[in-house]
Amino acid sequence: MQILYALESADTQLVSKEAARRLTDQQLDQSEAIYIYLLYFLGEVAHYAKTDAQIRASKLLPTPEDLHVNTKIADNKWVKYLREHPVFQQKIKRTHVDALIDTDLVKKIYHQLIELDVYRFYIIAAEREESEEKEILAYIFHELMMKNEEFDQHMEDVFTHWPDDRDMMSVLINNFFQKPTGIDFSLIIPEEKREYAAELLFTAYEKRAYCKDLITPRLEHWDPERIAAIDMILMIMAICEFLYFPTIPTKVTINEYIDIAKAYSTPQSGQFINGILDNVLKDLEAREKIQKTDQARN
């Protein structure tokens, strides 16, 4: 959607599927970098316990508390797992996200953490269950990072697409907490999803005139030129999924594009798009233009 909008605004031509793949890869690579950075930042907050212990121990007149800082969280099972995971570490180097770290913000979030009861309960436990190791990291991520306005602004400053990817990243990080060892860091965004993104982009661009011809008769009193650009792009993409992506059920397509419209367009866009797509779909089905595979039939 964003790429199609940019192409239309700049009046730029999309000349091939290869060009579409390059554009979608650029977007998906940034999403992958955000995911890696969130896990890296989380690990840095936990590992700051050792930095804090060194700083306090090196004071000219350290207190007994300064000399006995609890650093257990730095040795959290899943923090160590990430720090020792060869593919994850390669991803950090490849994406250069380590250069984006805000050490002052890491320190600030760490100091917020150590004042909380949830942290005190964590460090006094003689033995910690695997679930508790995940829970403390999930707490840091959801409560101290994702609900932190300063962190949110930091992410927006270093990743231009952060506002668009934010909700998706919460889902992906939750997947890591549920089954850390089940994450394949070499295939964060699988090849089939990259292929699908590029194919949908190129198809929607190539078939946009045909799709508009299907949409226009159903606009009744609406002037096609006054329809929100995002609404038109979303309807074109949805119609392309109806016609050219046989494994995607039509109901799934409609529901997903309604949700996207609600998030990115006007308050009325979801209902508007639902009505237009429903009418276009009925017409295409009547003319037997919809050919879905058996597993994708509604």
Image (cartoon, helix red, strand yellow):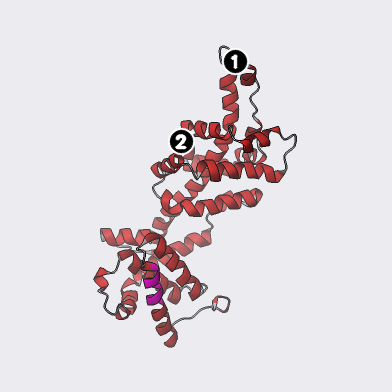
Mark 1 Cα shell of 10 Å, populated few (<14), some (14-19), many (≥20): few
Where does label 1 land, which residue? 62
Secondary structure predominantly adopted by residues drawn in magenta: helix
- Looking at the image, residue 229 sits to the left or right of residue 53; the answer is left
Query: Is residue 88 visible in this depiction of the protein?
Result: yes
Q: Does the magenta stretch include residue 289?
A: no
Q: Which amino acid does label 1 sit on?
A: Pro
Q: Nearer the viewer, residue 23 or 55?
A: 55
Q: Where is 59 relative to 240, above or below?
A: above
**Residue that mark 2 sits on:** 99
Amino acid carrying label 2: it is Ala
Q: Give the range drawn in magenta.
A: 270-277
Q: Where is residue 207 in the image (x, y as percent from the top left)?
A: 35, 72
Of tags 1 and 2, the one toward the viewer is: 1
- The mark that comes first in sequence, 1 or 2, is 1
Residue furthest to the top: 60
Which quadrant would residue 266 be assigned to in this image?
A: bottom left
User: In which quadrant will I find the N terminus?
Assistant: bottom left
Residue shown at the point (39%, 71%) measured from the top left:
271
Query: Which residue is nearer to you in this view: 281 or 87?
Result: 281
Pick the residue in front: 249 or 262: 262
What residue do we see at 64% from left, 48% from top?
Answer: 180
